[in-house]
Amino acid sequence: MQGPKPVSRRQFMWLSGLVAGAAGLAISPMGRAADPPRGDRDADTVLTQLLEGNKRFMRGELAHPRRKPEDFVPLADGQAPLTVVVSCADSRVAPELIFDQGVGDLFVVRVAGNVIAGAGASVKGSIEYAVAELDVRLILVLGHSQCGAVKAAIKHIDDKDALPGSIGDLVDLIRPAVAMVKDKRGDILDNAIKANVEQGVNRLKRLEPILADAVKKGTLKVAGAVYDLHSGKVTSVG
Ligand SMILES: [Zn+2]
């Protein structure tokens, strides 16, 4: 007679997570606290928290922190997000999912091509609001592999014909990043995606008066990263 089948490590962690979830405990499938102290808003600590969440996402060991209806209730009267994430509008790049964060954690500004320079008041003002009014100390500009907006900028870099509607104006904002890497070795799309992130980071660091002052005072960090659609990994840039 065969004994019970051994439980694999993955099954064990899934079961542990299930039991913990049933008990209403905020612990990850690994059995440790999923969340650092909520009061710690230091930029490096928050960035580490995001990258750890991305590792959980990659391993398929999601903690799914703060996603229940009751988690929304304490936030009804105010928010204290840990970071601004400026990411592409692409449907495959959902910051809360790829960083395994919960409601109230991320102040997300999404715009195709995660463009910042030239994007106007709606993008810049949103980011400034989070820093000035919500005391956010980290801004993460997040590009991603296979970005359609960057691809379009490469494809139309030398075109004189305009893209329809406002698409051409949007793609124009990415042209400087493409021009920067045009003669660089390696894959032009990957290089342009990185350059586009770096340009966004540099623009925000110098954005007077709110962001530039906070960066000078050391109360704000602006970082860049690229999310790989194939591996699920987020890699810091710059
Ligand atoms: Zn994109």
Image (cartoon, grey):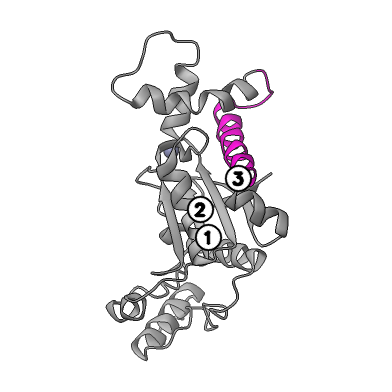
**Residue 163 position (above or below residue 101):** above
Q: Residues within 10 Å of mark 3 (few under 14, many from 20)?
A: few
Numbered disc 2: secondary structure: helix
Numbered disc 3: secondary structure: loop
Residue in the image at 38% along x and 74% along y: 78
Instruction: Name which of mark 1 and mark 3 comes first in the sequence.
Output: 1
Mark 2 sits on what residue?
A: 128
Q: Amino acid at mark 2?
A: Glu
**Residue 142 position (above or below residue 159):** below
Q: Residue furthest front?
A: 209
Residue range in magenta is 183-207
Q: Are marks 2 and 1 in contact (CB under 8 Å)?
A: yes
Determine which of the numbered discs, if any, sits on residue 132 in the image.
1
Determine which of the numbered discs, if any, sits on residue 208 in the image.
3
Horizontal and vertical percent position of residue 229: 47, 45
Quote the CA–CA distance across marks 2 and 1. 6 Å
* Residue 142 visible somewhere in the drawing: yes
Nearer to us in this view, 100 or 108:
108
Quote the CA–CA distance across marks 1 and 3. 12 Å
Q: Residues within 10 Å of mark 1 (few under 14, many from 20)?
A: few
